[in-house]
Amino acid sequence: MCGRYVSTRSPEDLSGLFHVPAPPSEHELPPSWNVAPTDAVWAVLERADRESGILERQLRALRWGLVPSWSKDPGGAAKMINARVETVADKPAYRRAFAKRRCLLPADGFYEWRSVPAAGSAKAYKQPYFISPQDGTVMAMAGLYEFWRDPSVTDRDDPAAWWATCTVITTEATDAAGRVHPRMPLVLAPADYDAWLDPAHEDPDTLRALLATPAEGRLEVRAVSTAVNNVRNNGPELLEDAPVS
């Protein structure tokens, strides 16, 4: 799974990388070295303008943890941060979004953990690893997004009436990441961005073809500070190399 990741690129950087207008400054998100479930995250998506009907690429903040439009409440969002590529086109929670509401979730890299057993007087603990592209490029994680209407807000035009949420699609980890955890985020190549984001592309087989397992040899895996284990810790010091027992 992917339960934490790093996202420190500015809206201006993301704007250039994904050919999308930067959002107004009042809507900016701060950089995060410890993105956790239910946090607001940057997403690149395409939607038709309400008035003109013209398809527009957007950079907008979504809440990480998908809430299907038919959910009675958002209580399960924190458990729906990942969608398995093997079943994403068929599961009721993701099927509609897979057909029409796909996005890219930019990341510098992601964290996975390996359990370290107790030894002598030392207690057992979980050692975090930071997994990122060797060349330092941004990871465009394949994602889905949904809109959920909060029935407790009577005014449909009130921004609080709508939750915009997302999930990360995961795949089998066959790269260096596989030595730490069997699953990893599915990252799309730049050549596939347009096809993935286009809501007019609804054929499941064509979409599945875009979700190929990443080639081996492109990821770097480093043990980092156990401070990342606490979601309240956030800063570049979390990426400092850590010795592994």
Image (spheres, rainbow, N blue to C red):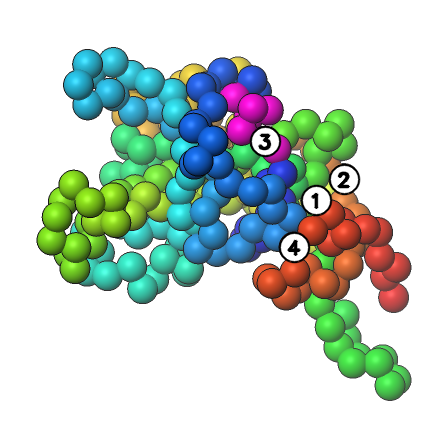
* Residue of label 4: 234
Q: Main secondary structure of the magenta part?
A: helix
Closer to the observer: label 2 or label 4? 4
Q: Are marks 2 and 4 in contact (CB under 8 Å)?
A: no
* Residue of label 2: 220
> How far is the residue under mark 4 from the one under mark 1?
17 Å
Closer to the observer: label 4 or label 1? 4
Is 137 inside the magenta-drawn segment? no
**Coordinates of residue 89 in the picture (x, y in percent):** 33, 39
The one of 150 and 201 positioned closer to us in this rendering: 150
> How far is the residue under mark 2 from the one under mark 1?
6 Å
Closer to the observer: label 3 or label 1? 3
Against 220, residue 38 (above or below) is below
Q: Residue furthest bottom?
A: 121
Say which element carries label 4: loop
Closer to the observer: label 2 or label 3? 3
Q: Residue furthest front?
A: 26
Q: Are marks 2 and 1 in contact (CB under 8 Å)?
A: yes
**Coordinates of residue 243 in the picture (x, y in percent):** 88, 59
Label at residue 131:
1
